[in-house]
Image: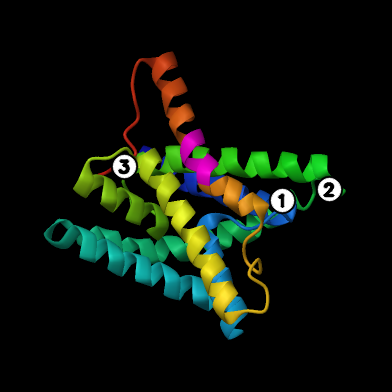
Amino acid sequence: MIKRIGCFVIGLFIMSLGVAFSIVSTLGTTPISSISYSLALITNINIGITTFIFNAALILIQFLILRKRFHRKRLLQLINCVLFGYFTDLALYIVGFIPFDSSILMCTAFLIASIFLTALGIFIYMPANIAPLPGEGCVESVAIVTGWRFSTIKIGFDAAMVIISLIMCGLWYTNILGAVNVGTIISAFMVGFTLRQINNLYSRITGHEVNVVNKN
């Protein structure tokens, strides 16, 4: 159990580093954060509150998808949101010490780091089977019901978040690109792909494949 908790905390922190790199890159926030940020821009409500509202909605969606297969342990995701928020603040502080000159090269390097760290964080913390973040919980729920690959669903889910954010900002905000930029769109497709490559590489090295989908 201690090992599982350790993997969960480490993976969550690595994922928060991915979010921090995406923010500092100035190329757009991560796909899963795009709707929360869109809500904050449209309503002028603090992003911490909109993030909680959005994550609570994602937990409800999981319940609707899983029905009788929804375990009460998934409600722990609400606690994860608080922990992840703290880690994100800490990660932003740490990344702030890395020299950044806003050049195209540096922006691209930070975006690549963001994609890799986000995928690596998911790869480490999801198999611990403590409780996923609501975004990954939704992806996991669809995987449980359909049997499709987690990484494939992750690509579709992130793409949907980006599209919804664009629609929201286009309809109710002054700038359709208020919450989404080119880095967000790239991340929407590349995080799931990178997660798959990490899993494949791990499988080739160890002979074992990590299953990021937990059915209980």
Residue depicted at x 36% and y 71%: 57
Distance (Cα) linking label 3 and label 1: 29 Å
Q: Nearer the viewer, residue 212 or 151?
A: 151
Left or right position of 158 against 141: right
Q: Amino acid at mark 2?
A: Phe
- Magenta range is 189-194
Q: Amino acid at mark 3?
A: Met
At mark 3, the secondary structure is loop
Going from N to C along the chain, the mark reached first, 2 or 3, is 3
Residue 98 percent coordinates (x, y): 79, 45
Residue 30 percent coordinates (x, y): 57, 55
Within 10 Å of the Cα at label 2, are there few (<14), some (14-19), or many (20+) other Cα atoms?
some
Q: Nearer the viewer, mark 2 or mark 3?
A: 2
Residue 94's tag is: 1
Residue 30 seen in the figure: yes
Distance (Cα) linking label 2 and label 1: 13 Å
Q: Is residue 61 magenta?
A: no
Q: Residue furthest left?
A: 68
Q: Amino acid at mark 1?
A: Ile
Q: Nearer the viewer, mark 3 or mark 1?
A: 1
Residue 130 percent coordinates (x, y): 33, 50
Query: Which residue bears the numbered disc 3?
Result: 1
At mark 2, the secondary structure is loop
Left or right position of 92 against 162: right
Residue depicted at x 73% and y 39%: 109
Query: Which residue bears the numbered disc 2?
Result: 100
